């Protein structure tokens, strides 16, 4: 008989993500949008059309006490872009999971989450496993450890990373998708902490010299004043997918000038600009973003830049944080891989006084979204994405309710044992 908690069997279930995979290179090249689809031929390898339904593959661990815990494997909306893993292919991922990962799982000790991740997610043939596999399998391993410990996922993270049990909520950031105006109203009426993303991913949405985008930013601020509760001042966060650089120019001074001017046009608001430019490589992104940060800091503006593309893995996040090459780093969880690495990434950002944004993608699932909440709350990130999907209401409900339930459980733990101030993996 095993002396430690084990996995007796593994089951797989194909599923759907909550949005679509989009060929970013084709969209950036200016293809025509016809209703919800894009016309034209895809450019990025693996895409058969420019917009494809997202897929997922669930992995269920049958534990030694017959309980079954799950994790979901998937990739992000703009797969194959910005240094990311290629498009998620269910059949290929399933073959690798069955041949490599499942045999490792069947001999794993899940009493330690970090130890199990190290063993199960080790390289294969001197190559890192696909990050989608790392992401889904690590979710399941975290749930297995929490199940045997009879704790929340967050408490496992607190225990294994030696963190105090959190008592503060993490601000939630909602994304609008293309239904900008209606979804902005939804966000304002629900008093979301950070909004609206905006999906500024084409020349049409950005406009000549950025005029269309600037008008949208000013409209959001105006709409908050019109329909928001008195005193409501959310952070304004916009993802521009590199279009400031593409349209204004790739010089750091020009980009900083544009961002500072934009901030001046919406006084009283902190403004986040995600991916102002894509400089084509991690090294170039690191150097140029550091220059933009320094320029904005010298001006004393309320504008902050957020890095996403070219900053995917834990090692890359560490480079950007140590170089102060962003005010905030999006920790895009499916691109980071193991959720243990996402937790480490938040801590790396905090150690370097850089903001940590626990993000992800609209293509994720309810299961991965709830796991992400536990990571964000346990590590006390600066903000977290309302996901999955682009419908706003569902994502706010899934993430917001999971956070509220989690904090209630942690407060109950304190009430029962006020001496304990560090998460524990024991009942």
Image: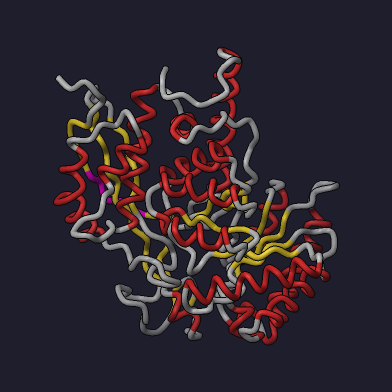
Q: Which residues are magenta?
A: 12-16
Q: Is residue 100 left or right of residue 29?
A: left
Q: Nearer the viewer, residue 72 or 277?
A: 277
Q: Can see residue 194?
A: yes
Tell me if residue 166 comes above or below residue 23 in the rendering: above
| Rendered location of residue 305, percent (x, y) | 65, 65
- Percent from the top left, x then y, of residue 365? 42, 49
* 321 vs 177, nearest the viewer: 321
- Count of picture labels: 0
Rendering quarter of residue 150: top left
Is 285 situated above or below 330?
below
- Which is nearer the eye, 215 or 79? 79
Residue at 72 percent across and 52 percent down: it is 188
Q: Quadrant of the C terminus?
A: top left
Residue drawn at x 32%, y 28% as measured from the top left: 111
Which colouring convention does the figure follow?
secondary structure
**Left-right relation of 388 to 56:** right
Pick the quarter of the image with the N terminus: top left
Residue occupying image coordinates x 55% and y 62%: 320
């Amino acid at each position: 008989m095993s002396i430690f908690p084990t996995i007796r069997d593994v089951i797989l279930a194909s599923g759907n993500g909550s949005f679509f995979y989009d060929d970013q290179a084709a969209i950036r090249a200016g293809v025509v949008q016809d209703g919800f689809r894009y016309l034209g031929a895809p450019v990025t390898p693996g895409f058969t059309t420019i917009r494809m339904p997202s897929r997922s593959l669930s992995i269920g661990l049958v534990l030694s006490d017959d309980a079954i815990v799950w994790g979901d494997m998937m990739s992000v909306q703009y797969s194959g872009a910005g240094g990311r893993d290629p498009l998620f292919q269910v059949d290929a991922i399933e073959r690798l999971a069955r041949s490599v990962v499942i045999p490792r799982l069947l001999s794993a000790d899940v009493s330690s989450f970090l130890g199990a991740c190290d063993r199960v997610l080790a390289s294969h043939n001197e190559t890192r496993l696909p990050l989608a596999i790392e992401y889904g399998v690590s979710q399941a391993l975290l749930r297995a450890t929490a199940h045997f410990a009879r704790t929340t996922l967050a408490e496992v993270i607190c225990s294994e990373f030696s963190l105090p049990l959190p008592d503060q909520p993490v601000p939630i950031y909602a994304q609008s998708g293309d239904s900008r105006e209606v979804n902005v109203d939804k966000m304002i009426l629900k008093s979301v902490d950070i909004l609206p993303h905006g999906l500024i991913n084409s020349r049409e949405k950005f406009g000549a010299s950025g005029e269309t985008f600037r008008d949208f930013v000013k409209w959001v601020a105006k709409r908050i004043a019109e329909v928001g509760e008195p005193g409501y001042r959310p952070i304004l966060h916009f993802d521009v997918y590199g279009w400031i650089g593409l349209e204004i120019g790739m010089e750091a001074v020009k980009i900083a000038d544009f961002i500072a001017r934009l901030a001046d046009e919406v006084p009283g608001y902190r403004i986040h600009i995600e991916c102002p430019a894509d400089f084509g490589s991690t090294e170039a992104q690191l150097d140029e973003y550091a220059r933009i940060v320094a320029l904005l800091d010298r001006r004393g503006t309320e504008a902050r830049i957020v890095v996403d593309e070219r900053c995917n893995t834990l090692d890359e996040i560490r480079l950007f944080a140590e170089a102060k090459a962003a005010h905030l780093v999006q920790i895009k969880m499916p691109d980071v891989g193991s959720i243990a690495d996402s937790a480490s990434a938040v801590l790396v950002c905090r150690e370097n006084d850089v903001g940590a944004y626990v993000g992800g993608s609209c293509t994720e699932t309810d299961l991965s979204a709830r796991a992400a909440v536990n990571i964000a709350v346990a590590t006390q990130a600066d903000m977290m994405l309302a996901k999955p999907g682009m419908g706003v209401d569902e994502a706010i409900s899934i993430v917001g309710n999971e956070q509220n339930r989690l904090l209630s459980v942690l407060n109950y733990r304190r009430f029962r044992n006020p001496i304990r101030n560090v998460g524990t993996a024991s009942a």
